[in-house]
Image (cartoon, coloured by chain):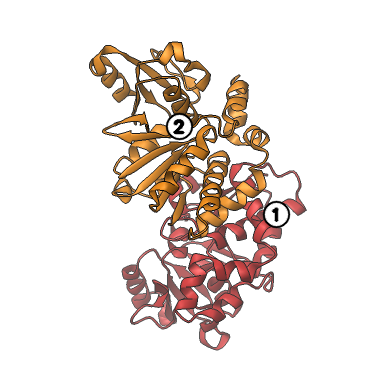
Chain colours: A red, B orange
Amino acid sequence: MKLNVLFSPIVADELYFTGKTSVVIDVLRASSTIVTALKNGAKEIVPVATVEFAVKVSGGMFGGQTLLGGERNTKKIEGFALGNSPLEYEEKVVNGKSIVFYTTNGTKALTKARFSENLFVCSFLNLNAVAKHLVSLNNNVEIICAGRNNFFSLEDTVCAGKLAAEIISMNPEVELNDSLYAALALNEKYGQVLLKMLKQSEHGKLLIENGFDEDINYCAQLNVFDVVPYYTNGVLKLMK
Amino acid sequence: MKLNVLFSPIVADELYFTGKTSVVIDVLRASSTIVTALKNGAKEIVPVATVEFAVKVSGGMFGGQTLLGGERNTKKIEGFALGNSPLEYEEKVVNGKSIVFYTTNGTKALTKARFSENLFVCSFLNLNAVAKHLVSLNNNVEIICAGRNNFFSLEDTVCAGKLAAEIISMNPEVELNDSLYAALALNEKYGQVLLKMLKQSEHGKLLIENGFDEDINYCAQLNVFDVVPYYTNGVLKLMK
């Protein structure tokens, strides 16, 4: 079993992922929000790469039981029912709904990796569940950090490192490469102080400036949900 | 003073560098070779982004005192006088010569960053000299890891982290960001065991497979040359 970490989705093109097993991580906040929405009963999440496509999809498809969700520059998009705060995605709001979801980095990474044979979503919230599932598949894995506007993001890489460490603890035969050495080192340094790390990260600071402190506390929780979102035919659902 | 580390040149486009102060790092081996060649009296290095352009440039320019150097997939290119091993660039070979230089990652990173207002080359060999010069300029700095085929490379990032740590030791006012937290953490983890780190890196292993063990020993030397290569009008020279 080999693991590889991509520190930004831009380092590979779409066809790179063809036939692969991939995991997308966008801790602040898309992958945390996707995990939360599905855990709280959303029927599915439809990740889209542009706002225009979100509006188009939400109009006619999925039987009208749709909600538009997401953000641009951390803020809710005009006309959207929901932003990108996981705390908005309560059971009473999302239960049974199809959620068309656009975010600046996370849903772009997901749509980029859409040719993967297996595509999963990981956050700190469901890290152990994803690790266990990946070990059971025993495929090579591409761990994709959504990053920020193509640039590196600390929190996604620490999460990638923690996911890798968890997988290695269950399967010590994993082959190491440069990206893993780096992600594992960052997990060693920051993996026991997740909340502090999130607060000192660039994205964390921006969220705090915009009043989303509670989201950071929420996204720093480790292994609180035993769920694995996976991508199938254009939508994200939970593994049974 | 702000520092930013790019873990691959692909995360930014060419115009991103316009007006900036940038440093290119390709420890194995382009930046180590450039530093060595200039230290040993080469008149200049002409970094080029394609082999075809290297051949074209070498034919008619620079008064005939040119040598073609570089590699493709770690090996010397057919018809080139020199490969990409710094040990080949001895004084008796390079003194007074213009060297047209192509490598898979390093010279591509250099040509990508060519719109920088100030553009320097750093390796472990000349790290302290580059750090001192950057502190004296007191500009914001983009530290560009050449990486490998757009992907992350451990040795370039450890070098970036060590360069950043050196700058911060001279100027504690440097603002930290996500990329710096990561590069500094990797320097903490690997910065005292450079040779071991180089040998365990993907590129290091490939070089060892191809018989370049001595290059790795050479490139692991820290602060042995007090030189700063800079880019001006298409060529690299030493700062006086």
Picture quarter containing residue B218? top right
Q: Nearer the viewer, residue A20 or B65?
A: B65
In percent of width and height, residue A13 lies at 42, 47
Image quarter hosting the N terminus of chain A:
top right
- Depicted A204 relative to depicted A191: above or below: below
Q: Which residue is mark 1?
A: A165
Q: Nearer the viewer, residue A128 or A194?
A: A194
Badge 1: how crowded within 10 Å, few (<14), some, or many (20+)? many
Q: Nearer the viewer, residue B129 or A121?
A: B129
Left/right of residue A118 with respect to residue A66 in the rendered view: right
- Tell me the element at label 2: loop
Q: Are marks 2 and 1 on the same chain?
A: no
- Asked whether residue B82 appears in the rendered view, the answer is yes
Q: Which residue is mark 2?
A: B227
Picture quarter containing residue A197? bottom right
Q: Nearer the viewer, residue B7 or B223?
A: B223
- Residue drawn at 45 percent across, 69 percent down: A46
Left/right of residue B203 with respect to residue B136 in the rendered view: right
In percent of width and height, residue A162 lies at 66, 58
Name the subunit of mark 2: B
Name the subunit of mark 1: A
